């Protein structure tokens, strides 16, 4: 807040002498008081209507402070709505966006709470939708999906719940497709290719039991390899 703003707040009350539309920001208005050349308040038109602010109305210092705070909360809320657009996002993602807009933490949290109460932000729903989408794409296993969910701010409990709803057969089918494609480009003997394929699928986030089953169907040559050798490599997560 500038010193000029602080000076305005010190006034016990002031009279609105004019209300003008802000030329720089759509749907915002500037309130001038006591014939000053600088606006005393800048606020969204929704708040202007809600508080019935008009020329010749007297505004107290406390009322002005409350309106400023309400306007900051509302601004954070509207920015959150705009950021959501047609794409679902997590609470953490929206918070990071609003921080980049240089809004204060208290107003960000208030906006996020409102968005959640209106079910516009739903981390559990996001987790289920995200996990299903990632699994359907067939490129990543549940362990990688869990990591991605947590990176997006989804709690461990919500991530675990979303992953528990995934279909194992669908995950195994995806791992088998990836194993089949990858095995064609691997070099070396069957044992070497098996080891490389194992590491590839594990890095993609597939659990050990899924990896074992997927590798059995991959074309790695005719050499016999004992599955028990996998025990020290494949660790179920």
Image: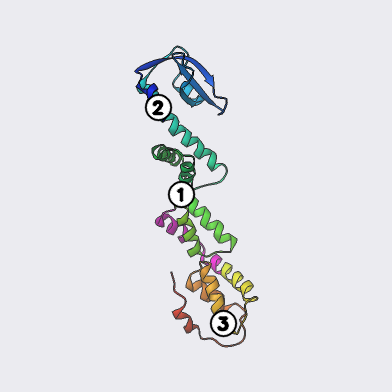
Q: Earlier in the sequence, mark 3 or mark 2?
A: 2
For discs 1 and 2, the disc positioned in front in the rendered view: 2
The crowding category of the residue bearing disc 2, from other C-alpha atoms within 10 Å (few below 14, some 14 to 19, many at least 20), is: few
Q: Which mark is residue 235?
A: none
Measured as percent of width and height from the top left, residue 105 is found at: 40, 40
Circles 3 and 2: CB distance less than 8 Å? no
Measured as percent of width and height from the top left, residue 56 is found at: 45, 11
The reply to whether residue 165 is in sight is no
Q: Which residue is mark 2?
A: 3
Q: Earlier in the sequence, mark 1 or mark 3?
A: 1
Instruction: Quarter of the image for the N terminus: give it.
Output: top left
Front residue of 38/80: it is 38
| SS assignment at label 2 | helix
| SS assignment at label 1 | helix
The figure's colour scheme reads rainbow
Span highlighted in magenta in the image: 154-172
Measured as percent of width and height from the top left, residue 142 is found at: 49, 63
Circles 1 and 3: CB distance less than 8 Å? no
* Magenta stretch holds residue 223: no
For discs 3 and 2, the disc positioned in front in the rendered view: 2
- Vertical order, 219 against 116 (above or below): below
Instruction: Quarter of the image for the C terminus: give it.
Output: bottom left
Q: Quadrant of residue 201?
A: bottom right
Q: Which mark is residue 123?
A: 1
Front residue of 3/32: it is 3
Q: Quadrant of residue 68?
A: top left
Query: Alpha-carbon distance for marks 1 and 3?
Result: 42 Å
Q: Which mark is residue 192?
A: 3
Circles 1 and 2: CB distance less than 8 Å? no
| Furthest residue toward right | 184
Q: Residue at x 48, y 50 (%)?
A: 125
């Amino acid at each position: 807040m500038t010193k000029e703003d602080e000076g305005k707040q010190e006034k016990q009350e002031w009279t609105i002498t004019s209300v003008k539309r802000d030329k720089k920001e759509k749907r915002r208005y500037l309130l001038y008081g006591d014939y000053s050349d600088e606006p005393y308040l800048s606020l969204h038109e929704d708040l202007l209507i809600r508080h019935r602010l008009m020329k010749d109305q007297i505004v107290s210092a406390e009322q002005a402070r409350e309106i400023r705070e309400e306007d900051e909360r509302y601004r954070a809320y509207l920015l959150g709505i705009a950021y959501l657009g047609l794409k679902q996002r997590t609470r953490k993602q929206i918070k990071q966006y609003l921080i980049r807009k240089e809004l204060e933490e208290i107003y960000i949290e208030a906006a996020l709470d409102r968005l959640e109460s209106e079910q516009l932000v739903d981390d559990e729903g996001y987790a289920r939708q995200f996990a299903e989408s990632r699994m359907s794409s067939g490129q990543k296993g549940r362990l990688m999906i869990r990591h991605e969910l947590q990176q997006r701010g989804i709690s461990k409990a919500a991530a675990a719940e979303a992953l528990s709803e995934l279909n194992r057969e669908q995950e195994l089918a995806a791992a088998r497709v990836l194993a089949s494609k990858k095995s064609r480009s691997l070099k070396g003997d069957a044992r070497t290719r098996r080891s490389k394929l194992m590491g590839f699928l594990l890095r993609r986030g597939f659990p050990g039991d899924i990896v074992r089953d997927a590798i059995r169907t991959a074309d790695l040559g005719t050499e016999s390899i004992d599955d028990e050798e996998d025990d020290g490599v494949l660790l179920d997560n």
